Image (tube, helix red, strand yellow):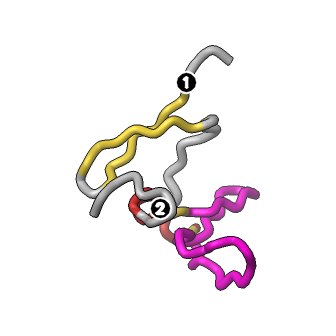
Amino acid sequence: NGFTVSIILNVMNRVVGTVVDSVSDVLEIPAEAIKPAPEIESAVDARYITGLGQVGDRMLILLDIESLITGPELGLAQN
C-alpha cells in the first residue's frame, strides 16, 4: 500500500518512532488478564517476553520493548 505505519515509543525517557509492517489494534489490557511469561526451552529467545495477555479469545504476547530496543541484538539505543 502507499503509506508508512509507525509507532511512537518512550524508551529510556526518550520519545522514539519505529516503522512497522502494520498495526491491527491498540488495546488496554486489564492486569487480571495478564499471565506471567511461560518458561520456554526452545530456539526462540524468550527473555523479552514479559507475559501473555488474554483478550476475548485472543492470546497476545507482551514484550519488554525497552529491553528489546536497548539489548545487544538490536542496540538501537544506548544505556
Residue sticking out furthest to the left: 13
Residue 73: percent from left, percent from top = 51, 63
What residue occupies the far top of the structure in this picture?
A: 2
The residue that appears at 40% across and 38% down in the rendered structure is: 17
User: Dot 2 corresponds to which residue?
Assistant: 68
Q: Which amino acid does label 2 sit on?
A: Leu
The numbered dot on residue 69 is none
Query: Quick one: 13 or 56, which is closer to the camera?
Result: 13
First in sequence: mark 1 vs mark 2: 1
In the picture, residue 47 is in which quadrant?
bottom right
- Sort mark 1 into few (<14), some (14-19) or many (20+) by Cα contacts within 10 Å: few
Asked if residue 38 is among those painted magenta in the image, a careful observer would answer: yes
Does dot 1 land on a helix, a strand or a loop? loop
- Magenta residues span 35-62
Residue 8 appears at what percent x and percent y? 40, 39
Circle 2 — which element? helix
| Rendered residue at 57%/71% (across/down) | 51
Q: Do the residues labelled 1 and 2 touch (CB within 8 Å)?
A: no
Query: Going by the image, does 75 lie left or right of 57?
Result: left
Q: Which mark is residue 4?
A: 1
Image position, residue 71 (x, y; %) = 43, 65
In the image, residue 74 above or below residue 50: above
Residue 71 lies within the magenta run: no
- For the N terminus, which image quadrant? top right
Front-most of 24 and 2?
2
Q: How many marks?
A: 2
Residue 66 is drawn in which quadrant? bottom left
Residue appearing at x 59%, y 77% in the figure: 37
> From the viewer's perspective, is residue 23 above or below residue 64?
above
Please provide percent x and percent y for residue 4.
Answer: 55, 24
Q: What residue type is labelled 1?
A: Thr
Picture residue at 63% right of the left edge, 36% below the top: 21
